[in-house]
Image: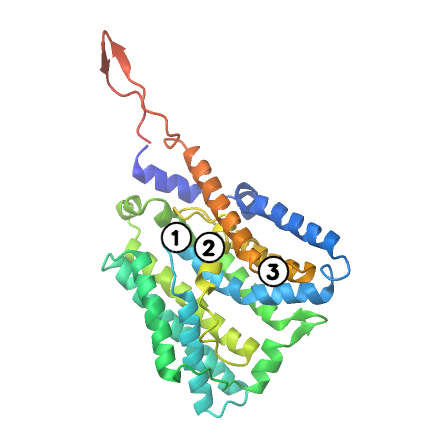
Amino acid sequence: MSSDVQVQNLLDTEKMSLWRRVTKIQAAQIVLVLIAICVIFSVMAPDAFPTVFNLRSIIVNTSIFAVLGVGATLVIITAGIDLSIGSVLVFSSVVAAKVMGSLGATGWGTALVGVVVAILCGAAWGFINGFLIAKAKVPAFIVTLGTLGMALGLAQVLTGGIDLTDVPGEFVDAVGFGNVFWEVPTLTVIAAVVVILGSILLHRTRFGLYTFAVGSNPEACRRVGIKVDRQLIWVYVISGACAGFAGVLSLAFYQQTTIGGQSMTALTVVAGVVIGGTSLFGGVGSIFGTVIGLLIPVVLESGFIIIGVESYWQGVVVGIFLIGAVYLDGLRRNRLPGRSGRKPRHRQSGDGKVGNTEKDV
């Protein structure tokens, strides 16, 4: 099968209903795992785990990760990686705090300026990542590892390593601690909107189709006229913008920047994305799966604290899930046509082998 036909088949496959895609991916199995974890903790701590207060804490703690996960999912679907999102979050929040502080740190107008500044800062870092990866052909791991250190270092230079608290009180009260209604946090509703928009972008637009195609076979995409470099740059810009927006949400939630508190954020998000069924090899993934994958470490942490188990075990369990997810993804890839791992069969002619009967796929 030619490369052009492969890409066309991928584009046609992506036009199937969202529900059919969801049920075909690893995330559908992860939902069952998440439900099982919740049932176990509910049985072990019936008076503490299945409560409105604990549920609210879980979804709030997942919200910022979910915003980061939208961008990270797009990146990983292209077979890339973005290790800089935690540092970009910090840098964006620092610049936003400084701008809001210079405007008096009061009022919704100041807060909106801070939001715009944070998103632009994140998008700028994303553009740097995307340009170096797409145009300079530097591996994504190296580029984003470098910008991880650069963004965090510049944030420390700007602040002297001291967290800033220049956040409008109205923004903190409404977004960081407010509810839309009853016990539904504003922060979670905002994150849900970002997740829905990300899902529409990925599964209902040409941009999303091209993202899957680039992750599946970039060379074939070039042959059919898809501008791969531009697509990659935009994917990383979106990832950076999501990190910038997460930075200003973090400001509202913590009421200050978190310069020293985001060292494991990128790894947590990448782990959640992969556990949710997005393939590190590219071409496969969903925002829905990412949200489910990110819920698992948060639920584990909450459950361990409630039943009295040291939270350090969370890292052990999440590591097991991560390795298992990559292993299952490898099995899935080996079942694909042409990736079975079997050696090509040869026709026999006397004592010699003639030709190769395996079709080119």
Residue at the spot 39% in from the left edge and 52% down from the top edge:
211
Provide the residue designation for mark 3. 310
> According to the image, label 1 marks what residue?
211
Give yes or no for contact between labels 3 and 2 (Cβ–Cβ under 8 Å): no
List the residue tagged with mark 2. Answer: 202
The amino acid pointed to by label 3 is Glu
Which amino acid is tagged 2? Answer: Leu
Q: Secondary structure at mark 2?
A: helix
The amino acid type of the residue labelled 1 equals Thr
- Residue 68: x and y, percent? 48, 64
User: In the structure shown, which secondary structural element does the residue marked by tag 1 occupy?
Assistant: helix
- Pinpoint residue 36: horizontal percent, then vertical percent: 66, 47
Q: In what quadrant of the picture does the C terminus appear?
A: top left
The residue under the point 34% across, 75% down is 153
Q: Position of residue 136 (x, y in %)?
A: 22, 60
Q: Quadrant of the N terminus?
A: top left
> Marks 2 and 1: CB-CB under 8 Å?
yes
